[in-house]
Amino acid sequence: MIVLITVAGSAFSQSYLTLRNQNRPKRFRFDHGDYIGVKLKDDRKVYQGELQGFTDSTIYIAGSMASHVIRIDEIRVVKDYRWKNFTGALARSALYTIPFFLVGEAATGGGSVKNFNDLTYRSGYILSVVYAGVAAILYPIKGRRFKIGNRWQLLVIRPFGN
């Protein structure tokens, strides 16, 4: 029981990175392992990867090619890719289900459509079009982008004095 309380206490006291809007009470929290991107003030390149850790003045991002140590005061833009990963996966799964609807419709005798009235009664074709529309709407959605400066502020939060 004591071990469980100790583990739970250390899990709740973990530090995290937060974006705070100075004009409105709005915050976005980034924990260890979140996929983010940052653009520096003097560089056009976007450094993206998994947030590995941070101190009061630097963040550590593990990208696909290399790890990057970035000073917090040099960051101009923070990109949140968590929403993009979700919508991209949803769009891909919608596209992957379309062939199953078409094969199911062909297997039940829906292979020949003579006029539009036949098409409206074929649920496989309708579902294929709906899923293609969902994929077309969701796939181009990009992650949120926050410009650091007058409006947004990047802070390291350490609860309970860690």
Image (cartoon, rainbow, N blue to C red):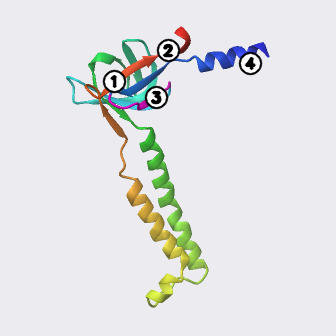
Which residues make up the magenta segment?
Answer: 23-32
Quarter of the picture containing the N terminus is top right
Residue 146 at x, y = what percent? 32, 33
Residue 153 is labelled as: 1
Report helix, strand or loop for mark 2: loop
Distance between the alpha carbons at the discs numbered 4 and 3: 25 Å
Queried whether the magenta region covers residue 96, the answer comes back as: no
Q: Which residue is mark 2?
A: 158
Queried whether the magenta region covers residue 30, the answer comes back as: yes
Left or right: 76 as drawn, with respect to 112:
left
> Looking at numbered disc 4 in the image, what kind of residue is underneath it?
Leu
Distance between the alpha carbons at the discs numbered 2 and 4: 22 Å
Q: Nearer the viewer, residue 12 or 36?
A: 12
Mark 4 or mark 3: name the one nearer the start of the chain: 4
> Looking at numbered disc 3 in the image, what kind of residue is underneath it?
Arg
Report helix, strand or loop for mark 3: strand
